[in-house]
Amino acid sequence: MTTLTAKDKDAVRTFWAKVSGKEEDIGTDAVARMLAVYPQTKTYFSHWKDLSPSSPSARKHGITVMKGVADAVSKIDDLKGGLLTLSELHAFTLRVDPANFKILSHCLLVVLSIKFPNDFTPEAHVALDKFLAAVALALAEKYR
Amino acid sequence: MVEWTDFERATIADIFSKIQYEVVGPAALARCLVVYPWTQRYFGNFGNLYNAAAISGNPMVAKHGTTILHGLDRAVKNMDDIKATYAELSVLHSEKLHVDPDNFKLLSDCLTIVVAAQLGKAFSGEVQAAFQKFLAVVVSALGRQYH
């Protein structure tokens, strides 16, 4: 579905430069929101002692996820190749239904909208939406 | 029948009392047309939609965005029977406008993002959950009369 144009990649890299330093806050907020707004996502974390959005496990997971997204930005020219290991992890070990990638992407965009109300313009939004969709596709690459 | 908690009722009323319909409506619709350009198919007579700047500055987009928010207002005032409130609008979107109901969700997501920017930190996870539940009920009601 998505081929990122040069313009898209530039927009993502430019916006991501602004995110620098705030990744942890953004990641933890996005995962917390996901658990609160889409309770069905909690089914993947039944091994956590505390499933509340503000739990230490949720916070830690937000940081992990965000590191992955930041990594994807650096590998934006070859997401399929760059995210191969992560794709294998999600396909064979985690087996997260790919529908959930869309859910988390949406929550991430909501957080970006709150934290960067002026920079998260419609143009930045479409580029990031395309990017996150491309990341999701790369993550689902090894599923079947 | 949709069950609303006290928190959800209060949250929806609060959000709609705080937002400016003529700011949020146009911004949400414009964002939808930019982020999901295929939605432009329904607005062939709106004139210049060639790029993001044109869309954001288009007066017909602005007017329609405001109309949509006022339409949402009807659900805010009738939370216990949104299905009936939107029966006519559902028929209109299906029979006359021929809008693919999947598009309602796209606009819904853009509305969430615009309201999030407006309310900032106050748009917590719990508030977002209530708002998205409200929009999901609206979207379902609007798709009800399609056949």
Image (spheres, coloured by chain):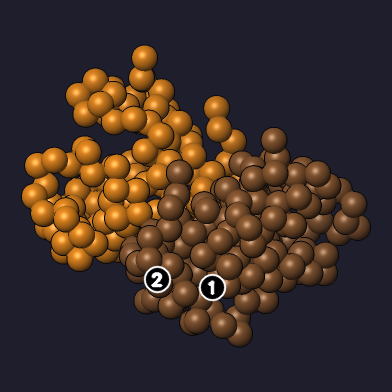
Chain letter for the part of the structure drawn in orange: B
> Is residue B45 visible to the viewer in this orientation of the structure?
yes
Instruction: Give the residue number, with chain letter if any, for mark 1.
Output: B121
Is residue B106 left or right of A52 when viewed as pictured?
left
Is residue B80 left or right of B124 when viewed as pictured?
left
C-alpha distance separating marks 2 and 1: 25 Å
Dot 1 lies on which element? helix
Q: Are marks 2 and 1 on the same chain?
A: no
Subunit ID for the residue under disc 2: A
- Hey, what amino acid is under mark 2? Ala
As rendered, which of B118 and A144 lies closer to the eye? A144
Dot 2 lies on which element? helix
Question: Residue A11: which disc?
Answer: 2
Estimate the x, y position of residue B52 in percent, counting from the top left: 24, 62
Image quadrant occupied by the C terminus of chain A: top right
Estimate the x, y position of residue A87 in percent, counting from the top left: 71, 51
Image quadrant occupied by the N terminus of chain A: top left
Is residue A65 left or right of B99 when viewed as pictured?
right
Q: Residue at x 36, y 19 (%)?
A: B146
Q: Residue at x 83, y 65 (%)?
A: A57
Question: Residue A98: which disc?
Answer: none
State whether residue B108 is above or below residue B15. Answer: above
Q: What colour denotes chain A?
A: brown
Q: Residue at x 43, y 67 (%)?
A: A9
